[in-house]
Image: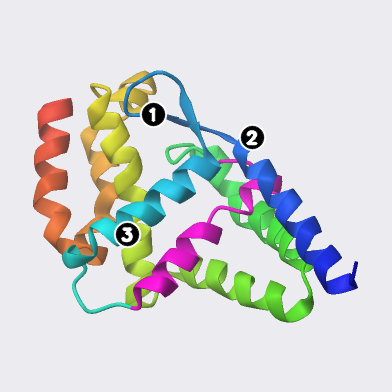
Amino acid sequence: MSDLIAQRIAFIKEADKLKTIIRRTQLMDGSRYENTAEHCWHVALMALTLIEYAPVQLDLPHVVRMLLVHDLVEIDAGDTFAFDAKGHETKEAREQAAADRLFGLLPEPDGLALRSLWEEFEASETPEARYALAMDRLEPLLSNISNAGGSWREHQIDNAAILRRMDPIRTGAPGLWPYVLTAIEATMGT
């Protein structure tokens, strides 16, 4: 086997570990907590399905590629709960170290390309990244409203904190913002 194939296969095998990272959000049917690989697939599917709510025409394949790699760093860094202030203090450093290792498993051009997608998502400066982030925020909202407040109620998160967390949807997929407001109010009350 060539070195390039071996490196790519090693990366693919390492990426399989994303299936073992358990998030704090339950599946919509409430049967169990989702893993990060499921989350990445679901947000990519959502991006395809909800594209008409983006504020501008986007490079949709680019958005999907970004969403497929946006949480790979959780293999090493773990999933930091959205409302965990202490965990967020070290999140960036943990994720940068994870990105160094994980994307470094690939041949350099491949690793740089995937890391670039991850960095674009993290910076959230392009219309594609803002839309991708909106989908990333919308997916747990859908799960929580399907579970009568789910992890929001479990962790006693108030509406103001939920709205702050959901705010990227307002700019990344503004056509969905009225739905978000209505769903939060219907689920959590005022």
Circle nearer the N terminus (1, 3): 1
The residue to which callout 1 is attached is: 27
Which residue: 12% across, 61% down?
175
Is residue 66 a member of the stretch shown in magenta? yes
> Which amino acid is tagged 1?
Leu
Q: Is residue 3 visible?
A: yes
Q: Residues within 10 Å of mark 3 (few under 14, many from 20)?
A: many
At which x and y percent is residue 182? 9, 40
Q: Which colour style is shown?
A: rainbow
Circle nearer the N terminus (2, 3): 2
Residue 91 or residue 111, whichever sits in front = 111
The residue to which callout 3 is attached is: 47
- The quarter of the rendered structure image containing the C terminus is top left
At which x and y percent is residue 62? 43, 74
Dominant secondary structure of the magenta stretch? helix
Is residue 8 a member of the stretch shown in magenta? no
With 109 as the anchor, is 79 left or right in this view? left
Q: Is residue 165 visible?
A: no
Res. 169 image quadrant = bottom left
**Quick check: marks 1 and 2 in contact, CB under 8 Å?**
no
> Which amino acid is tagged 3?
Ala
With 71 as the anchor, is 132 left or right in this view? left
> Which amino acid is tagged 2?
Thr
The residue to which callout 2 is attached is: 20
At which x and y percent is residue 67? 46, 60
